[in-house]
Amino acid sequence: MAEEMTLEQIYALYDRDGDGLVTAEQLHEKLTQEGFEVPLSTLKAIILLATKTGEFKILKSEFRKFILIILETENFEDILYRIADLDGNGVIDEYEFGILRDKMGWSLQFPGKEMTREQFIKYVGQYLEK
Ligand SMILES: [Ca+2]
């Protein structure tokens, strides 16, 4: 039976200098070693959106939410959706949309009603640079 690592142990693998922050570079290096190919620029964008530090660093308290988003999603739109859905109820409401919009610097109107995952991805997809 495989021994389950605690979040604390997993975090220590990423935060190798032990300063209590995981940088985008540390995260990228580790994920690459594990076989996850996520561009550094995408990781930086996600970290900026998903964390409170406003820098490309992840606090231990935010790490769990963050690492689950990275490992369980396949594309940037989906990651944005997961980050935007703050209450986790599966739809993006006006409040949640406004927070994401401000962080992204979009001048994008809320379409008037809550968006499902599919609607959200379609709606914001046109504003994402490929
Ligand atoms: Ca929601």
Image (tube, helix red, strand yellow):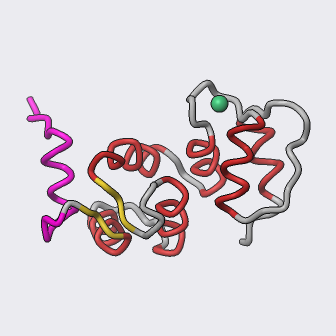
Query: Residue 46 vs residue 89: left or right?
Result: left
Q: Position of residue 14 (x, y in %)?
A: 22, 61
Q: Is residue 103 above or below residue 26?
A: above
Q: Could you tell me how many numbered marks the image carries?
A: 0
Q: Which quadrant of the figure shows ligand 1? A: top right
At a point 84% along the width and 61% down the height, the residue shown is 107
Q: Is residue 11 above or below residue 36?
A: above
Q: Nearer the viewer, residue 34 or 95?
A: 95
At a point 19% along the width and 49% down the height, the residue shown is 10
Q: Nearer the viewer, residue 50 or 125?
A: 50
Q: Is residue 49 above or below residue 56?
A: above
At a point 91% along the width and 35% down the height, the residue shown is 112
Query: Residue 14 vs residue 25: left or right?
Result: left
Q: Position of residue 21 (x, y in %)?
A: 26, 63
Q: Position of residue 130 (x, y in %)?
A: 72, 71
User: Where does the magenta region start and end?
Assistant: 1-19
Give the quadrant of the N terminus.
Answer: top left
Can you tell which quarter of the image residue 119 is in?
A: top right
Q: Position of residue 52 (x, y in %)?
A: 45, 55
Q: Is residue 20 magenta?
A: no
Can you tell which quarter of the image residue 2 is in?
A: top left
Q: Nearer the viewer, residue 111 or 117?
A: 111
